[in-house]
Amino acid sequence: EVRYDFDSFFSSPRQLALGDTRLLYPHDEILFLYNPAILSYTKEKHFFITKISLYSGASAGYLYNALNLSSYNLSPTEWIGFDWQSLTNELLRDPYGIILNANPETGIFGPLCLGYMGNGIGILLYNNFFSKIDIRQAPGLPYVELKSFAEIGISLGFSTYFEILKFHTLHTGISLSYSKRYKSPFFYGASVLEVAKYYENTANQIYEYDVGDSVWGNIGIVLDDGGHFKYSLTINNFFGRSFYWTRIVYQNNQETLKRQNYVSYIPPSIAIGTIFHVEKIPYIPTFLLSDFIIELNLVNLLKLDEFWFKKVKIGSEISILKILKVRGGLNQGYPTLGLGIDIDILVIDVAVSQYEGGVLPGQQPIQNISLSVEMKI
């Protein structure tokens, strides 16, 4: 049996604030994990010491209704605070229902982030974590899907370029990656009774989880027109990405193989993008405003059964006083925004964004906030 899996959590506030565009942004070399051609066209070279991105999201609309927030005046200029007793009563009325039906999710990239990017070469040792709860209604007891995993991996990338025509440059890149992943046994669902039994066993220090590993690769192409535009084509997981899973029981400080019963798969995907980048804005001193960027991505072009609006991502950024980055965009039709501070070896980014968790526009919008801290030399 082959099941579909989640891609790795390679998200950062920079990407999320820019409408989740991630194919051509020139100031984040870690994006070679998506587009290895970035390694030869970016001008910056870094040794990464550490990078950690924290992410938390949920259906804010559901929480707004469940906690009866409409009874409060939330205007920033008139807000006088919450009635914490009333708010607590709303929360305690059905705490599990609120937690589960709000579709909460959390993610972490790092803190393991060691590597080098520059001179057409990229190497990165990393870890990431993602967790999301979905509830599916079924006859009798509801069905719980705990889509949670932790992963450690290493990626190697190489990129070179060729001069074509008079001013155009073609950058090509390829990356190969290996990762080991630990996953929740309820990733594809279980009844409430099965989940309760599992946590009853954990009280007796008996744990079950799935372990799998995978190898995959990405191909990227970037065309630089010699001016302000660049164009990109990427093929991610170009030979597919398969995990072969083994169920492990951990008890008395020992791991015991329980069974190996399924394979999960992430199919290849194709994305195209373009970016308009002006380092020096005409008639404006660079110490005031600089590095104006607009990027457009069209993703998952092979996924023909997906609505077109979920494929569109747009982001824009401008630098103020060389260190403050102001960002905004549209991700699947939803607005995103964020700020960044870049001071030599220290970079701090924050973003507020959202995406469509359902199939139709507006069916299940998921709002999220994210924060990252990065040190590089």
Image (tube, rainbow, N blue to C red):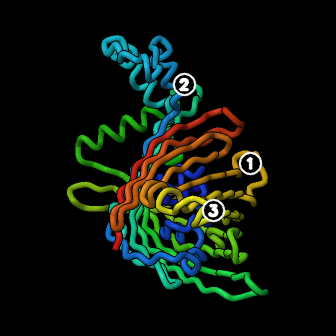
Q: Quadrant of the C terminus?
A: bottom left
Cβ atoms at labels 1 and 2 below 8 Å apart: no
Q: Quadrant of the N terminus?
A: bottom right
Q: Is 310 rendered above or below residue 94?
A: below
Q: CA distance from mark 1 to mark 2?
A: 31 Å
115 left or right of 355 in image: left
The three-letter code of the residue at mark 3 reads Pro
- Residue 69: in sight, yes or no? yes
The structure residue drawn at horizontal position 23% and vertical position 43%, both measured from the top left corner, is 204
- Residue 232: in sight, yes or no? no
Tag on residue 282?
A: 3
Of marks 1 and 3, the one in the foreground: 3
* Label 1 or label 2, whichever comes before in sequence order: 2
Name the residue nearer the viewer: 209 or 62.
62
Q: Which type of secondary structure does the marked residue at label 1 adopt?
A: loop
The structure residue drawn at horizontal position 44% and vertical position 62%, both measured from the top left corner, is 246
89 left or right of 57 in image: left
